[in-house]
Image: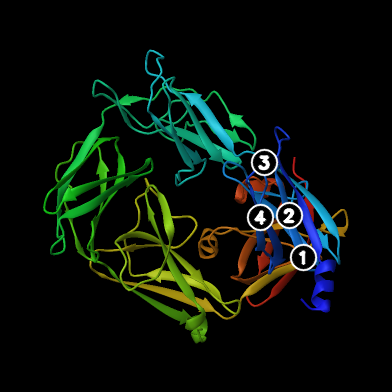
Amino acid sequence: MSVCALAASLQAGIIHGIVIEQASSRPLARTRVQLQVVRGGRLETVSQAVTSRAGQYWFPSLADGAYVVKAVRAGYAESYYGRKRAEPVAVEGDSNAFAEIRMKKLGAITGRISDENLVALAGVEVIAYPARLPLRMAATAKTDDRGVYRVAGLLPGRYWVRTAAHTLEDGSGLLPTFFPGSPGTQEARILQVTLDGEAADADFLPLPGRLFRISGRVTGCPVNEKLARVTLSSDTGRKETQAPCEGRYTFEGLAPANYELAAEPASVPGRAAFAEQFVDQDTESAHLQMTLLPQVEVRMEGADNAAVPQDQIRVSLRRRDLAGEGSLSPLKKEMTPGYWEVFVQAPASHYFAKFSSLDMRRRGPRVGESKDAPEVFLGLAGFNRMTLTFSNRPAAIEGVVRSGGDPAAGAPVFLYPAGADLRKRLYGYKMLYTDAKGMFRFGGLPPGSYLLMSSEDLDEIHETTLADARAKSVELIEGRVERVELALEELK
């Protein structure tokens, strides 16, 4: 090592500290700690460590700068150094900074499931959903021998809790039931979940009712394929079975509801089947005919005939069945049939202006379309075209966040599109962190109405919570930059 390099290493800064459980004040061993910096409004990890048995961590030899320290542990909410927010830790020269991080456990919902005689029911699946439509499962659990359930790992927010269909020992059935005892969400009671807390005593009796069977033949397998994988999805989850090619599949114990059926060869790709079925009686003829995969074409157009930088645009799809979303998949010429959410990433010089497709098929009113992304149905063995329109005149919002008159570094800023179509093209809300001077910038935005706020106290981000928190309303005009100043809000 040269003399200059040795001198630089001796002058490098250090960040070290300890990770502690908030409720017990005990050290958390084997916890992952990430060292991050704010780049382009995002927190980017530059180094990682794992705490010792005493809960301690150490980041040596750091260059000058402002760093954010984050702790991640299963069963706990992600936590940062700072009383409420990701407070940057300054490193200068050979400075030695100590950063204590306190972690809170994720929330839970607990209760007891009983039969008509108030006797405990074991093995009943219980599902927690964020209290909004369409239903999307957050977490599940099963009752123990006491009939007690604990749905854990929940972020703060408002939830519904519901049992899944269940077959009893005598063959009779229990229908999916929302706490405190209703078949639908209209009479369901909302439970408030907090970190380090439990929404307790959510005890209820599932409603009795008849359960049904769905069965059919699987045909159209590729040559030399012997088995097909069949998946049944609903808003209470997924079930999977295997069936012999040209043979039958069966699912038992189904409540009256909408279902999606999908079939794929077990080992030879290239064919698939998809069907939608409303079940309110035993069905023996729900046949699945596998065909070639749908062909997908994407056409990109510029608003007002403007040029489109197609090589800079990325299109991904995410499969969405009734049980929820899958993972993002790069767009391919062939995709499996069913409903897909479309995600478009455009360069900062353009914004995603419009989505259209030849698809005329939409989910029924009982189910509802995705609220967070454009959705397309890819039909069986057919030609599917999507048209994406882009404008080269994006809007932007930039400004500063202040706390007590001073710039608030590392403060979260939330941008919520007010219109449903706008929200789909931006995939829900956007969030970023201010830089060391409290500055922020959202670029590449479509024109329209937005809600904007900075706070560390928001558990849920949607139109109601932001309106209740008196978020600032901003109207963006195409091609213009709107400049705003925000206060770091403390909410009760």
Report the residue that reaches farthest toward the top. 117
Distance between mark 4 and mark 1 Cα atoms: 14 Å
Residue, disc 4: 49
Q: Is residue 87 above or below residue 184?
A: below
Mark 2 residue type = Trp
Give x and y (percent) for residue 479: 64, 78
Give x and y (percent) for residue 388: 44, 74
- Which of the two discs, 4 and 1, labels the residue nearer the N terminus? 4
Q: Is residue 283 above or below residue 410?
A: above
Q: Are marks 2 and 3 in contact (CB under 8 Å)?
A: no
Residue 76 visible in the shown view: yes
Residue, disc 3: 28
> Which secondary structure lies at badge 4?
strand
- Which of the two discs, 2 and 3, labels the residue nearer the N terminus? 3
Residue, disc 1: 62
Q: Are marks 4 and 2 in contact (CB under 8 Å)?
A: yes
Question: Quadrant of the image for the N terminus?
Answer: bottom right
Distance between mark 1 and mark 3 Cα atoms: 24 Å
Question: Quadrant of the image for the C terminus?
Answer: top right
Distance between mark 4 and mark 2 Cα atoms: 7 Å
Query: Dot 2 surroundings within 10 Å: few (below 14), some, or many (20 or more)?
Result: some
Residue 472 visible in the shown view: no
Mark 3 residue type = Leu
- Which of the two discs, 4 and 2, labels the residue nearer the N terminus? 4
Left or right: 135, with 381 as reference point: right
Query: Dot 4 surroundings within 10 Å: few (below 14), some, or many (20 or more)?
Result: some
Query: Dot 1 surroundings within 10 Å: few (below 14), some, or many (20 or more)?
Result: some
Quarter location, residue 206: top left
Residue, disc 2: 58
Mark 4 residue type = Ala
Mark 1 residue type = Leu
